[in-house]
Image: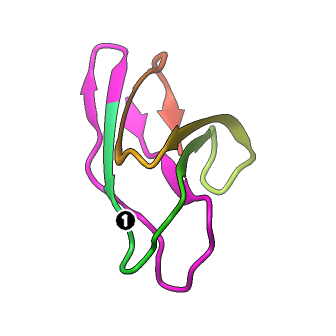
Amino acid sequence: FTTAFRIEASRLVPDASPRLGRATVTGPSVSLTWTPGAGSGASGYTVVASRTPGGAAFFSLEVGTRTTATLSAPDGAYY
């Protein structure tokens, strides 16, 4: 089971990209945590997943200003 999710801030600020921590997988549950980029002041985050690296997103979830998310995902590789 490979997990790699992309976290996007809803406001673009140079050098303010959030940093995704290590995902925790327990059965079908995937827990993600991230830290805001330096001085980001992001108004919200969106968890985005694709089936291939850099591929089109097939899943996205707006999580507001939280820096954690727990999702249910079937077996597979996600990027």
Residue for point 45% across, 19% down: 75
In the rendering, at what x and y percent does residue 14 appear? 55, 86
Residue 23 covered by magenta stretch: yes
What residue occupies the far right of the structure in this picture? 56
- Figure check: 75 above or below 20: above
Q: In which quarter of the image is residue 34?
A: bottom left
In the rendering, at what x and y percent does residue 46 appear? 57, 46
Q: Quadrant of residue 29?
A: top left
Quadrant location, the N terminus: top left
- Figure check: 74 above or below 31: above
Q: Give the range drawn in magenta.
A: 1-30
Amino acid at pointer 1: Pro
Q: From the image, tell me which residue sits under label 1.
A: 36
Q: How is the image coloured?
A: rainbow
What residue occupies the far bottom of the structure in this picture? 14
Residue for point 50% across, 64% down: 42
Residue 70 or residue 58, whichever sits in front: 70
Instruction: Locate residue 59 relative to residue 79 in the image: left or right.
Output: right
Residue for point 38% across, 44% down: 66
Residue 77 or residue 46, whichever sits in front: 46
In the rendering, at what x and y percent does residue 79 appear? 53, 46
Q: Is mark 1 on a helix, strand or loop?
A: loop
Residue for point 37% across, 15% down: 28
Residue 38 covered by magenta stretch: no
In the rendering, at what x and y percent does residue 5 appear? 48, 45
Label 1, residues with CA under 10 Å away: few <14, some 14-19, many ≥20: some
- Figure check: 6 above or below 42: above
Q: Quadrant of residue 68?
A: top left
Please tell me how many numbered marks the rendered image carries: 1
